């Protein structure tokens, strides 16, 4: 048998040996986050690339996980939908923050992070040939999971205008065809920091109802909205019955390694997603599920304090990047800042990010990898600010040397 590890050759020229990687995943390679974190480790650079905090979440939540392990809670397979304590806490969270009522037994599903929630939802809900509309730039796993489902992604590009990225609702409407099965949204939006405004959400909801579309909405940064409040799409008229809402404890409680995520949706959608989920991981994160149940019940002061802390960090890094000569798109949410490197005399974000460690000891993410329309993202670079203040200040100082 002729074996080959190279990626799929679509040229159609010589028949050649069959590649290992299936056609759908050809070209996906290694995620940019892994590539850039490895670069940071190799060069000893400050890592403002991959979005993970450099300080763990609340000590009492970590203690709750230790207690669960010691008490023998979750050390064996937890129930497929998630432990009842966590499902109840997730439902209570939706009620407390948004006034949305979900039945913990039939309308909540715990997943291995938002990543599995995205994968299981897309694999469960799509047929080959279906079209999925996603906001571009899109989080990298969206494209891979749409491909694994055999469906087609249809990007609608967020465009920069007056210091922020905006959705063109006419473009969104025009992207819907008879083959469109679902809208895959993300607000607050990684990597641009855009938060869809209530009027935009209302227009999206109207469109979804009119064209009878399913909606998957990735709201993992729901507690990192710096201006205004987070509006869950599922709360809009006609949306509850067609919306899968995704969130994750990784972002809100700064325990990204625990991989406790979830969906809330009506029973028929939860059942569909659970069917796919049970053959991906079946279950995960047993003891951590109990700890996150306690975390979700933390008082409002935790949530407010977390947001205010990140707002201050956003301002430190935004100011530093601006002073260093970048064009800064000030994020209204998430813990990422998208910048344009053109004012620094640079054109290509990928080249820039690959050379940055050597030039000044900082790692960032080139936004181009989140675009089908690579030209639209070519000069854009993302920096994460979920890092300690002294680290952000040092990074800003180092980046300031670029122009000096
Ligand atoms: N969606 C978005 C928009 C994200 O930024 C991330 C991770 N940073 C995820 C999903 C994945 O979340 P998790 O780590 O819970 O799998
Ligand atoms: N979501 C994180 C980011 O955008 C990365 C998570 C991952 O590495 N898959 O940086």
Image (tube, helix red, strand yellow):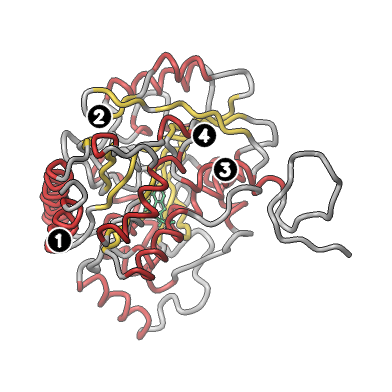
Task: Give the structural element (helix, strand or loop) at label 2.
Answer: strand
Tell whether label 4 touches label 2 (CB within 8 Å): no
Tell whether label 3 touches label 4 (CB within 8 Å): no
Of tags 4 and 3, which is closer to the observer? 4
Q: Which residue is located at x 30 percent, y 29 percent?
A: 165
Alpha carbons under labels 2 and 4: distance apart: 20 Å
Q: How many marks?
A: 4
Residue designated by label 4: 372
> Which callout, 4 or 1, points at the residue further toward the start of the chain?
4
Q: Which mark is residue 394?
A: 1
Compared to residue 75, the image places residue 283 above or below, namely: above
> Which callout, 2 or 3, points at the residue further toward the start of the chain?
3
Residue designated by label 2: 164
Of tags 2 and 3, which is closer to the observer? 2
Label 2 Cα crowd, 10 Å radius (few <14 / some 14-19 / many 20+): some
Alpha carbons under labels 1 and 3: distance apart: 41 Å
Label 1 Cα crowd, 10 Å radius (few <14 / some 14-19 / many 20+): some
Across and down, in percent, residue 169 comes to 39, 17
Residue occupying the far right of the picture: 1
Q: As rendered, which of 51 and 188 lies closer to the eye? A: 51
Residue 296 in the figure: left or right of residue 390: right
Alpha carbons under labels 2 and 3: distance apart: 29 Å
Compared to residue 34, the image places residue 23 above or below, namely: above
Residue designated by label 3: 122
Task: Give the structural element (helix, strand or loop) at label 1.
Answer: helix
């Amino acid at each position: 048998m002729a074996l080959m590890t190279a990626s799929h050759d679509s040229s159609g020229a010589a028949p050649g040996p069959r590649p290992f990687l299936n056609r759908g995943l050809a070209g996906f390679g290694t995620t940019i986050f892994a590539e850039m974190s490895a670069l940071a480790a190799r060069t000893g650079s400050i890592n403002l690339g991959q979005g993970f905090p450099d300080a763990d979440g609340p000590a009492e939540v970590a203690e709750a996980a230790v207690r669960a392990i010691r008490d023998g809670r979750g050390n064996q397979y937890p129930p497929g939908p998630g432990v009842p304590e966590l499902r109840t806490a997730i439902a209570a969270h939706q009620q407390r923050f948004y006034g949305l009522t979900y039945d913990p037994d039939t309308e909540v599903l715990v997943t291995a992070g938002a990543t599995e929630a995205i994968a299981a939802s897309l694999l469960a809900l799509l047929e080959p040939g279906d079209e999925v509309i996603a906001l571009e730039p899109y989080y990298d796993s969206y494209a891979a999971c749409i491909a694994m489902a055999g469906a087609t992604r249809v990007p609608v590009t967020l465009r920069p205008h007056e210091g922020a990225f905006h959705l063109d609702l006419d473009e969104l409407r025009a992207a819907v065809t008879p083959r469109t099965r679902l809208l895959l949204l993300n607000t607050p939006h990684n990597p641009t920091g855009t938060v869809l405004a209530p009027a935009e959400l209302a227009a999206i909801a109207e469109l979804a109802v009119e064209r009878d579309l399913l909606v998957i909405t990735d709201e993992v940064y729901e507690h990192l909205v710096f201006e205004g409040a987070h509006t869950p799409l599922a709360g809009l008229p006609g949306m509850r019955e067609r919306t899968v809402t995704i969130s994750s404890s990784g972002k809100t409680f700064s325990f990204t390694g625990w991989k406790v995520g979830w969906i809330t949706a009506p029973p028929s959608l939860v059942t569909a997603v659970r069917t796919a989920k049970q053959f991906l991981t079946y279950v995960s994160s047993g003891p951590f599920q109990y700890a996150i149940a306690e975390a979700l019940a933390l008082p409002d002061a935790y949530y407010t304090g977390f947001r205010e802390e990140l707002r201050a960090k956003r301002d430190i890094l935004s100011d530093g990047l601006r002073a260093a000569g970048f064009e800064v798109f000030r994020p209204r949410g998430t813990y990422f800042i998208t910048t344009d490197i053109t004012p620094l005399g640079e054109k290509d974000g990928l080249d820039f990010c690959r050379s940055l460690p050597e030039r000044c000891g900082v790692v960032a993410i080139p936004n181009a990898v989140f675009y089908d329309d690579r030209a639209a993202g070519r000069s854009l670079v993302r920096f994460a600010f979920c890092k300690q203040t002294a680290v952000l200040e040092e990074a800003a100082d180092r980046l300031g040397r670029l122009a000096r």
